[in-house]
Image (cartoon, rainbow, N blue to C red):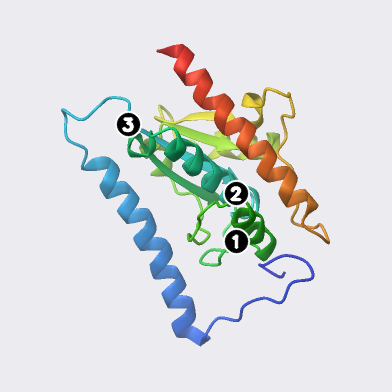
Amino acid sequence: MNPRGPGLKPKKPNGRSGLVRRYLRHTIRARHLMERVESRLPDQPVSNKTYNELCIRNICRSPIAEGVFQKVVNERNQGDNWEIDSAAIGGWHVGYPPDDRALQTMKKHQVNYNNTARQIVSEDFMTFDYIFGMDESNIKDLKKRAPKHCKAQILLFGDFDPQGDRIIRDPYYDSDSKGFEKCYEQSLRCSEGFLEHLAKQV
């Protein structure tokens, strides 16, 4: 399976050392996030939240949703209140960057992104406040993996779309970038809708 998407030439790992480097980047990324969350001082604002986007591969939908949500909170001057990440259900693409078409779509909309794919781990359910699935299958898988009494709320990202488009478009098998553009538009609406939902809870 081509980890970078159908019709795209995969980036070949540089032998064993390349695989080790990708694994270390994935491990260090997860560890740094855990340390940032755990190191919060007791007197820091209670508005600090953690947010994780989840899809099957972590190279199409969830990186776009992660990058878009980060951009939206930054534009609202709320970036310091959030720790944002994304992950995959499966481990097929761990260590790989997003699909080229996802990167091109984010670049088009001035969304900065430089993470690589990682697979969700049990600690995520106790670290994050919110874990979002892109579709009903993601939600089913997340609920199966979630430990009892987990901290995270498992939510369908599309439930926060004011247009009611509940399933985030999966463009992995597309031959062009149109599906990625739709995924971006959905992610933008859902990010804003989720933040507005939170604001009403205050």
- The C terminus: image quadrant: top left
Cα distance in 3D space between marks 1 and 2: 9 Å
Q: Determine whether 164 is above or below 191 in the image.
A: above
Percent position (x, y) of residue 156?
A: 62, 30
Instruction: Check disc 1: other Cα within 10 Å, few if <14, some if 14-19, many if 20+.
Output: many
| Left or right side of 93 for 168 | right
Q: Mark 1 belongs to which amino acid?
A: Pro
Q: In the rendering, which numbered label is found on residue 98?
A: 1
Residue assigned mark 2: 64
Q: Determine whether 48 is above or below 184 in the image.
A: above
**Which quarter of the picture shows residue 7?**
bottom right
Instruction: Check disc 2: other Cα within 10 Å, few if <14, some if 14-19, many if 20+.
Output: many
**Residue at x-position 48% and y-position 81%:** 18
**Residue at x-position 59% and y-position 64%:** 93
Q: Determine whether 185 is above or below 104 in the image.
A: above
**Residue at x-position 38% and y-position 44%:** 123
Secondary element at image label 1: loop
Q: Mark 3 belongs to which amino acid?
A: Asn
Q: In the rendering, which numbered label is found on residue 48?
A: 3
- State if disc 1 and disc 3 touch (CB < 8 Å): no
Q: Mark 2 belongs to which amino acid?
A: Ile
Percent position (x, y) of residue 132?
A: 55, 35
Give the mark nearest the N terminus, 1 or 2: 2
- The N terminus: image quadrant: bottom right
**Residue at x-position 33% and y-position 38%:** 80
Percent position (x, y) of residue 197?
A: 52, 19
